[in-house]
Image: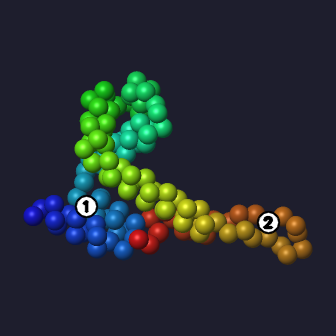
Amino acid sequence: MALNKLRAAFLAAKDGNEVEEIIKGVLTSDERIKIGRRILVSQLIDEGNTYDTIRQRLRVGKQTVLQVQRLKSLSPKCFELINIREEKVENTFGNKAYKMVGNPKRFQKFPRYTGFKRKDVIR
């Protein structure tokens, strides 16, 4: 029942701003960091890094790396979905965050930040 409440809250979020508000409201900063590290560990495992390299690079324990590997084998779709969503957000952000501006008489234009943030990407 409690998990259903959390799931419904995330599904009802229309963009990253609302997701961020939910995350800030229900998770401590330590919990947010730990979840973020698990995602990073998963990505480094996918890149073929050794456990020792991951431990040194992210400053996590051996048990964290082993736990993520176990979670990946139990639910491989989870981290795949996270990576797909991250790629979509980065592509959308890259297309909307900057626009090329410049004087029409000049040949060179410069990128200008539009104020669009990753969390502004609509789901």
Residue 113 appears in which quarter of the rendering?
Answer: bottom right
- Which residue sits at x=41%, y=36%? 45
From the top left corner, tell me how far across and down residue 42 is, in percent.
Answer: 38, 41
Percent coordinates x, y for residue 99 in the rendering: 68, 69
Residue 13 visible, this orientation: yes
Disc 1 target residue: 25
Q: Name the residue under label 2.
A: 109
Amino acid at the residue labelled 2: Lys
Q: Residue at (29%, 59%) from the top-left corner? A: 23
Q: Residue at x 71, y 63 (%)?
A: 111
As rendered, which of 3 and 32 lies closer to the eye? 3
Nearest to the eye among marks 1 and 2: give it: 2
Vertical placement of residue 39 versus 12, above or below: above
The vertical placement of 20 against 73, above or below, is below
Q: Which residue sits furthest left?
A: 1
Amino acid, disc 1: Gly
Circle 1 SS class: helix
Residue 53 locus on image (x, y percent): 44, 26
Name the residue located 30 percent from the left edge and 38 percent from the top edge.
Answer: 68
- Residue 33, visible in the rendered structure: no
Q: In this view, does 101 lie to the left or right of 44?
A: right
Q: Position of residue 82 (x, y in %)?
A: 38, 54
Dividing the image into 4 quarters, which one contains the C terminus? Answer: bottom left
Q: Is residue 99 left or right of residue 72?
A: right
Q: Is residue 86 above or below residue 66?
A: below
Mark nearer the N terminus (1 vs 2):
1
